[in-house]
Image: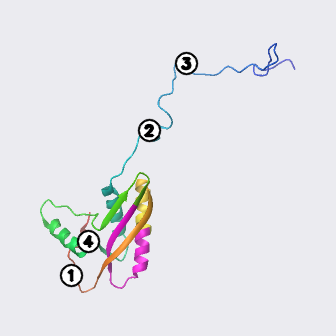
Amino acid sequence: MTDMTEQNRTDSSGSEKEAPQSRKPGVTKRGGGDPATRGRTTIADGVVEKIAGLAARDVLGVHAMGSGLSRTFGAVRDRVPGGSKSVSRGVKAEVGELQTALDLEIVVEYGVSIADVARAVRENVIAAVERMTGLEVVEVNIAVSDVKLPEEEDEEPEARLQ
């Protein structure tokens, strides 16, 4: 075989020659690595609280969020012109760089299994927060502060939250 590639030819010293490096002229690599990894994203506690509050309210059996006092103040604030509804009422988040922990205070409907509602709230909140923020949810603590009885009047209609 007389046809040898440049890479396989040996010089007089018996060592192999290195293949010439192929470079594109005028192309320089800028930055370092994937553009998506350049920089840092921070997520405020309030963002996580809103996501968790909306996710918790989506669970059947959850009547309201927050303690009786916070719901009363919220109902008054909501009636003030220019006031906004607080979707994060009853939710407290501690957000780190990669993880978050949540405390929720809920009111459940009478007749539902509190254990089942709490499990469903945890699952829904964890899925929503992790999907939307990329943070790992390390814990979701749930405090059931009240039970909504069928004959009780609503302090505020939760269905109007937006």
Q: Which residue is mark 3?
A: 25
- Give the colour scheme shown: rainbow
Q: Kindly indicate the quadrant of the structure image that contains residue 8.
A: top right
Give the residue type at disc 3: Pro
Q: Measured along the vertical axis of the image, is residue 104 above or below residue 47? A: below
x and y, in percent, of residue 21 in the image: 65, 21
Q: Which residue is mark 2?
A: 38
x and y, in percent, of residue 151 in the image: 24, 86
Label 4: how many Cα within 10 Å (few below 14, some 14–19, many 20+): some
Q: N-terminal of the two: label 1 or label 2?
A: 2
Magenta part of the protein: which range?
Answer: 101-122
Which quadrant is home to the N terminus?
Answer: top right
Q: N-terminal of the two: label 3 or label 4?
A: 3
x and y, in percent, of residue 111 in the image: 36, 85
Tell whether position 120 is magenta: yes
- Residue farthest toward the top in the current orientation of the protein: 12
